[in-house]
Amino acid sequence: MSWNGFGKLNIADVQEAGDPVLQPGKYIVTCDDAVVEDGRNPSDKRLVLTFKAPEGQLRSNLNIHNKSAQATEIALRQLKSFLVSAGHSNPDQPGDVSTLKGLQVGIIVGEGKPYTNKEGNSIVPKEVKRFFPVEKFDDIVVQEQPSRAAKASAAQQQSAQNKAMMDDEIPF
């Protein structure tokens, strides 16, 4: 393929980039993909679930087998909540991972723990905070949560106010 300039560029047969990431809120999603991958340590396993909605998609990584017992326990509780809320035929023993594909469930999306990526940019990931049955969608109320940045700013302001109050001279 030779370059003939931007004006001659033909991208008719090119697919658009992936779906946008779901933003905080509540959604009805379908589990579009489910796969077990190795973790950082080859003996660790994580279940990677891809949830899709008309508004976008979200990946959820569950550490279903990890050297950290706490990480494993959290992941298994999340998996059980997903399976029960989605009406899986056997949430206690789900069997083949392919049985998760196509399940429909309600989710509440929120902000995860911020981190700095390889390029040095601060990232606030989005993550599933809660699963619920689709039929309860209208009953679920999502309270607006301040962002982590707003919480940090408010904490700094409160700290400055506290310090100013402590600097008052007290006559003895």
Image: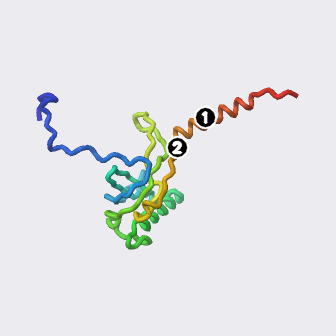
Mark 1, secondary structure of its residue: helix
Q: Residue at x 46, y 65 (%)?
A: 80
Nearer the observer, 41 or 125 = 125
The Cα–Cα distance between marks 1 and 2, rounded to whole angstroms, is 15 Å
Q: Position of residue 66 (x, y in %)?
A: 47, 58
Badge 2 density bin: few <14, some 14–19, many ≥20, Cα 10 Å = few
Quadrant (top left, top right, bottom left, bottom right) of the C terminus: top right
Q: Position of residue 7 (x, y in %)?
A: 14, 29
> What colouring style does the render use?
rainbow
Q: Say which quarter of the image contains residue 151.
A: top right
Kindly identify the amino acid type of the residue bearing the numbered disc 2: Pro
The label shown at residue 146 is 2
The relative height of residue 84 versus residue 20 in the rendered view (above or below) is below
> Is 14 situated left or right of 159 in this image?
left
Q: Position of residue 82 (x, y in %)?
A: 43, 63
Kindly identify the amino acid type of the residue bearing the numbered disc 1: Gln
The label shown at residue 80 is none
* Earlier residue among tags 1 and 2: 2
> Is 150 situated left or right of 13 in this image?
right
Tag nearer the camera, 1 or 2? 2
Q: Residue at x 74, y 31 (%)?
A: 166
Q: Is residue 45 in view from this perspective?
A: no
Q: Is residue 82 in view from this perspective?
A: yes
The relative height of residue 35 versus residue 99 in the rendered view (above or below) is above
Mark 2, secondary structure of its residue: loop
The relative height of residue 9 versus residue 49 in the rendered view (above or below) is above
Nearer the observer, 79 or 136 = 136
Q: Which residue is mark 1?
A: 156
Q: Position of residue 49 (x, y in %)?
A: 37, 57
Nearer the observer, 126 or 42 = 126
Q: Residue furthest right?
A: 172
